[in-house]
Amino acid sequence: MQYRALGDSDLEVSAIGFGGWPMGGHRYGGSNDDEEVGAVRRALDTGINLFDTASGYGLGHSETVLGRALKGRWDDVVVVTKTGICWEEASQRFVRDSRPEQIQEQCETSLRNLGTDRIDVYLIHWPDPDTQMDVTMRAMENLQDAGKIAYVGASNFPPALMDQARAVVSIVANQVGYHMLDRRNADQIIPYCATNGIGVMAYGSLAHGVLTGTFTEDPKFDDDDWRKPGYAFGLPLFHPRHLSATLEAVDEVTSAAASAGLTTSQLALRWVLEEPAISTALVGFRNADEVDSAVAALESELPNGVLDAANIATRTAYDRLLIAEQPEKEIGPGRRTS
């Protein structure tokens, strides 16, 4: 396994990180707890040491399953979880809430779910426009001072908000979306983090399933799956109007990967890790076989031109998707109503 620094912190994290969103099951195609536990333990055996989850993933279920899987192995890992969103019963949706009392309550719940007394890296999941940044970050600093968390981080924060957060407390990581078919964070956020010694945790490395090589033009999403409306954070990644052309680009990635003896997902993962500012590329593993496949992606030398071919094909597809971007289709949590 390869390891990289998490920004300017003293943490060394695996280049491949275990993403815990699918583990929660809720709105992501369901999950099998026993298989997920097996995947975590296989990841540990391969040297993966960064495990990412959130209080919102499965309404805490992801944290609970991860805690079960890591029992007795806490000294070997860096666990990242998140606060700042909550489920609003009245609207039946997630909303942003980074008020101090919410952060404190969610931290205590996450500690119980995980079965630990300290969180390694604690992130604000989404910026909350209704709570002042200094108030939010002082609440995080208080948790740090109390020994509840070791490091403070952010997720989905643009540079201007990173500046506000860093004026209060040191930020070691920003977790943002980044993959072959979504490069929106490559122009500002990733360079900002590189310049300021902040680790980048890339989520969606396999385009939320599109870059696995198994996606079809008629994906069968459950009714509550967040991907069913067709948009990934405003980008029409799964939309029927664009999916056929996108999958043609994926076919080119598959051909390029095959020429190097790799799978589609392995080449997609290598592409993400070509960016030196990326500390870890998160993959939402569902079973041990997926772990083995991802780890194998790091073991082979790539022939000249393979990444270039995949990059050109997907760049064209990304540009086409970007033209059709609809920010109002953002699936991130909305503003709270109370």
Image (spheres, rainbow, N blue to C red):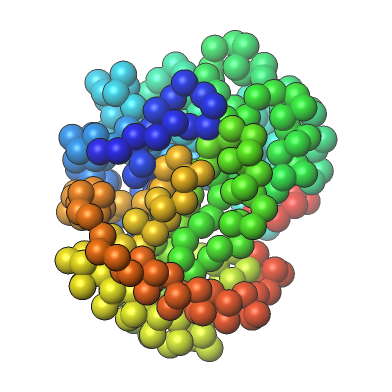
Tell which of 211 and 142 is nearer to you. 211
Residue 244 placement: quadrant: bottom left
> Given the current orientation, which residue lies at the most extreme top position?
146
Q: Is residue 185 left or right of residue 222?
A: right
Residue 193: in sight, yes or no? yes
Picture layout, residue 161 above or below residue 217: above
Tell which of 166 and 38 is nearer to you. 166
Q: Residue 248: give x, y in percent of width and height.
A: 38, 85
Residue found at x 61% / y 62%: 184
Residue 264: in sight, yes or no? no
Residue 247 placement: quadrant: bottom left
> Given the current orientation, which residue lies at the most extreme front position?
304
Tell which of 105 and 159 is nearer to you. 159
Residue found at x 34% / y 27%: 77
Residue found at x 58% / y 77%: 319
Q: Residue 5: give x, y in percent of width and height.
A: 44, 31
Residue found at x 44% / y 25%: 11
Tell which of 250 and 301 is nearer to you. 301
Number of callouts: 0
Picture layout, residue 185 above or below residue 221: above
Q: Residue 240: give x, y in percent of width and height.
A: 49, 86
Picture layout, residue 47 above or below residue 260: above
Q: Residue 300: give x, y in percent of width and height.
A: 20, 54
Q: Is residue 223 left or right of residue 264?
A: right
Query: Where is the N terminus found, in terms of image quarters?
Result: top left
